[in-house]
Amino acid sequence: MTRFPTLPSRCMPLLAIVVGSLWLAGCATPNGRGGGNGEEPAEALTELGMAYLERNNLPRAMSALNRALEREPDDPEALQAMAIVYQRQGEHDLADETFQRALSVDPGNSRARNNYAAFLYDRGQVRRACEQLEFASQDPHYASRAQLFANLGQCQRELGEIEQARQHLERAKSLDPRNPRSYLTLAELELDHGNPQRARQQLEIFVRLAGMTPGAQALAEEIAAAVPDMTVTPGRASSDVP
């Protein structure tokens, strides 16, 4: 018997959002770049807004992104960043509308699709979130593919699509073997479906990479309850990680 309703108690309840750390070469500054008329170009203002967003400075992020959109109203990067600002402010209708605007302008924007999926998942629209992630997974050039496949696996797990979830979590591991998130989600999946030995193996790798987090400790206790003589030994499965 599966236990999907308990997912948020052990694992990250939300899909991971990609803000801009893989996109920005550096933080823009108000005097860093200017156009020929002395105004900041939209791209620089978008970078500035993303930098503030990464620091969760929402007022300054919104100010910079509003100025970017005044110059380029259909800039997809500025739109998807503004959608995240709205999401964090609790303006869910505006966030949804703005994500959709970004994707209507640039349907191939995989970062925007990943972030829209995270928004939909947070709102309980899990199937729609999976659809966005499946679309984005077709982009072989997306820089954050490991995170995307981890998101897709987590999403499919909650829908009960276990084999697809397992496949995509394994794919995430192969793309980035040192990212701990996929190991924890896969450990939870295996335990939920009667495979405590596999769950322990995945959890041991997670603990080696990320330490014994509260979520990992809770899962270790569940494994011990399922198989009393089984304990989690951090690093035991270290040969599986480059």
Image: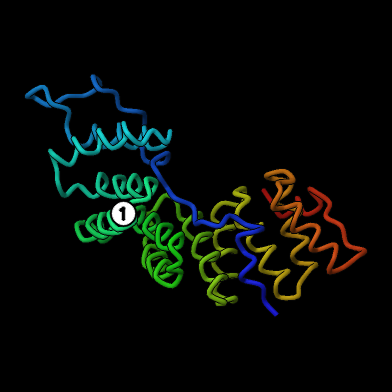
Q: Nearer the viewer, residue 237 or 162?
A: 162
Residue behind mark 1:
95
Which residue corresponds to the image point at 69% horizontal and 52% vertical from the top-left? 215
Up-down relation of residue 195 to residue 69 (above or below):
below
Q: Quadrant of the N terminus?
A: bottom right
Q: Residue furthest top?
A: 31
Q: Nearer the viewer, residue 118 or 91?
A: 91
How far from the left and from the top, in percent, is residue 39? Answer: 13, 26
How far from the left and from the top, in percent, is residue 16? Answer: 49, 52
Q: Nearer the viewer, residue 53 or 167?
A: 53
Which residue corresponds to the image point at 28% horizontal and 37% vertical from the top-left? 62
* Amino acid tagged 1: Ala
How far from the left and from the top, in percent, is residue 141? Answer: 37, 55
Which residue corresponds to the image point at 91% horizontal and 65% vertical from the top-left? 228
How far from the left and from the top, in percent, is residue 41? Answer: 16, 32
Which residue corresponds to the image point at 43% horizontal and 33% vertical from the top-left? 55
Quarter where residue 27 is shown: top left
Q: Residue furthest bottom?
A: 1
Image-based side of 149 in relation to 26, left or right: right
Q: Nearer the viewer, residue 80 or 44?
A: 80
Residue count near mark 1 (Cα–Cα under 10 Å), binned few <14, some 14–19, many ≥20: many
Colour option used: rainbow
Up-down relation of residue 76 to residue 70 (above or below):
below
- Element at label 1: helix
Image-based side of 85 in relation to 221, left or right: left
Quarter where residue 65 is shown: top left
